[in-house]
Image (cartoon, rainbow, N blue to C red):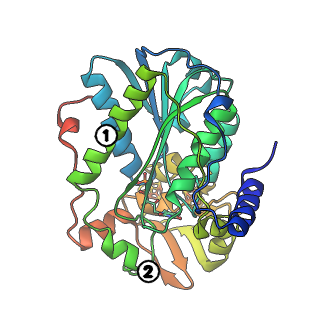
Amino acid sequence: METRRGFIKKSAIVGAALCLPVSLTRESRAAYPDLKTRNPKRMLVLWYSQTGQTRRYARLIGCILKGKGLAVDACDMQEFDKNLLSNYDLVIVGTPVFYYDTPANVSEWLETIPSIKGTPVAAFVSFGGPEGNQHNASSHILKLLADKGGVPVGRDTFRNIASYPTPNWNTPNQISGQHLPNAATFDQVRRFTADVMERITLGETISVGYEVALREGLSWLPLVWLNKKAISKHTVDAQKCIGCQTCVRKCPTKAINPSQQTVDRDKCLACFGCLNNCPADAVVMEYKGERLYGFPEYLKRNKIAIMEPSELNTCSL
Ligand SMILES: Cc1cc2nc3c(=O)[nH]c(=O)nc-3n(C[C@H](O)[C@H](O)[C@H](O)COP(=O)(O)O)c2cc1C
Ligand code: SF4
Ligand code: SF4
């Protein structure tokens, strides 16, 4: 089968030659199997989330569906048994955009799920900047689900405050997105959920639809490797560490060992999950010699309170 990158490269060349618009789709709707139901009852919302933003949207989607009387499970995909996927009438997967793409551990997880032939599937991403290649990152999730027989019925991208640590947390994207998510973001999530349900009822599907975007090219670069080269120190401060194991739980590759103060740099994906979740400022990361601090500390120093959607006040998911 043609690879995603191969397709986009060819589309760009042909599109440029023919002066076509730059937004192209990859698969026709006819390519998908029939939806297994138009009356879904059992829903699954899966997320991968390092600083809670994707999780917030996933819970909101789950709570909206639950509020409509549907049976909903919502779970961190790292804790979910993928053999249970075919039990559901709708599977929605959400992840952050990392390095202009779906996080590598999420892609690997989705590549190894069993067949979900005919199951309606939808994808969303949370992202931190307008040029973050968010559309194609969500397409990537949808394609991986469609490769396993899932039938795409929805996709969206939700911008929020960026949680990529830089020494002063003051890049233009970090500053311009500090107030997000806001009420409009949560309305967008509500619309996405309603659209997904409506499409299933009507038996409609959507195409995976990659865009030919400049930023897609950046996702082909070895960004994780380059970033790891720039991280001059990555260890654990034994004096500060309280042994809570949060970093171990959050690390997607089990690369960190706080009791030995070590990080397996080969396994590390430079996701900053350890730094961004340590409650004791014990994860030491230096970027080009400058000490980084994590997302909670950034919120505290800047007195930023992230808005919560009202549905989560009363919903137990
Ligand atoms: C390692 C890393 C890489 C990131 N790369 C991108 C990116 O390429 N494009 C983008 O729009 N946002 C990027 N971001 C910002 C995240 O996508 C954004 O903060 C997201 O909402 C985090 O989701 P979470 O709270 O569920 O982990 C990156 C963040 C991190 C930590
Ligand atoms: S060690 Fe930290 S930065 Fe590296 S993969 Fe694990 S959580 Fe992510
Ligand atoms: S999260 Fe921080 S305090 Fe907890 S075990 Fe890891 S390094 Fe130690």
In the figure, 42 relative to 125: above or below? above
User: How far, Cα to Cα, is label 2 from label 1?
Assistant: 36 Å
Quarter of the view holding residue 119: top right
| Residue behind mark 2 | 167
Would you call the spot at circle 2 few (<14 residues within 10 Å), some (14-19), or many (20 or more)? some
Amino acid under disc 2:
Pro
**Mark 2 touches mark 1? (CB < 8 Å):** no
On the image, the x and y values in percent for residue 255 come to 63, 55
Where does ligand 3 appear, by image quarter? Answer: bottom left
Residue under the image location 25 percent in, 45 percent down: 187
**Residue 169 visible in rendering:** no
Identify which residue, 25 or 84, lies in the foreground: 25
| Residue behind mark 1 | 191
Left/right placement of residue 172 relative to residue 155 reads left
On the image, the x and y values in percent for residue 173 come to 39, 73
User: Which quadrant is home to the C terminus?
Assistant: top left
Amino acid under disc 1:
Arg
Residue under the image location 60 percent in, 19 percent down: 34
Left/right placement of residue 97 relative to residue 316 reads right
Secondary structure under tag 2 reads: loop
Residue under the image location 44 percent in, 80 percent down: 167
On the image, the x and y values in percent for residue 211 come to 58, 57
- Sequence-wise, the earlier of marks 2 and 1 is 2
Would you call the spot at circle 1 few (<14 residues within 10 Å), some (14-19), or many (20 or more)? some
User: Which quadrant is home to the N terminus?
Assistant: top right
Secondary structure under tag 1 reads: helix
